[in-house]
Image (tube, rainbow, N blue to C red):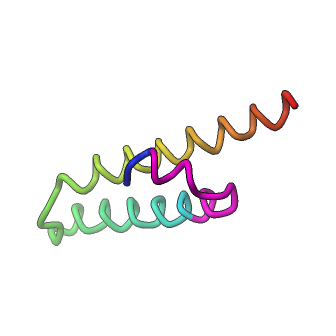
Amino acid sequence: MKAKELRDLTRDELGERAKELSRELFNLRFQKATGQLGNTAMIPKTKRDLARVKTLLRASDISTKTK
């Protein structure tokens, strides 16, 4: 998911998206450990997406505190 698309989401939607990505990352790691993961490139992609969401959540925390 692109950062531009994420910026359009509300804070609650970003929190929900972070939960989904964390769950997905867990499932991908589990599949890798059991040998069921076909596309291993999904793990770093999911980690990057999760980092983007967390960065935007953190930025919104800082911006609300300074106002």
**Residue 16: percent from left, percent from top:** 60, 65
Name which quarter of the figure residue 58 lies in. top right
Name which quarter of the figure residue 1 lies in. bottom left
Residue at 76% x, 33% y: name it. Answer: 63
Range covered by the magenta-colored residues: 4-16
- In the displayed structure, 5 sits above or below 62; it is below
Magenta stretch containing residue 35, yes or no?
Answer: no
Residue at 66% x, 58% y: name it. Answer: 10
Q: In this image, 26 relative to 20: left or right? A: left
Q: In this image, 65 relative to 17: left or right? A: right
User: Hey, which residue is sitting farthest bottom in the picture?
Assistant: 36
**Residue 56: percent from left, percent from top:** 59, 42
Magenta stretch containing residue 14, yes or no?
Answer: yes
**Residue 42: percent from left, percent from top:** 24, 56
Name which quarter of the figure residue 9 lies in. bottom right
- In the displayed structure, 21 sits above or below 55; it is below
Number of numbered tags placed on the structure image: 0
Residue at 64% x, 44% y: name it. Answer: 57
For this rendering, which residue is in front, 48 or 29? 48
Q: In this image, 20 relative to 12: left or right? A: left
User: Hey, which residue is sitting farthest left in the picture?
Assistant: 38
Magenta stretch mostly in which secondary structure?
helix
Q: Quadrant of the C terminus?
A: top right
Residue at 56% x, 38% y: name it. Answer: 55
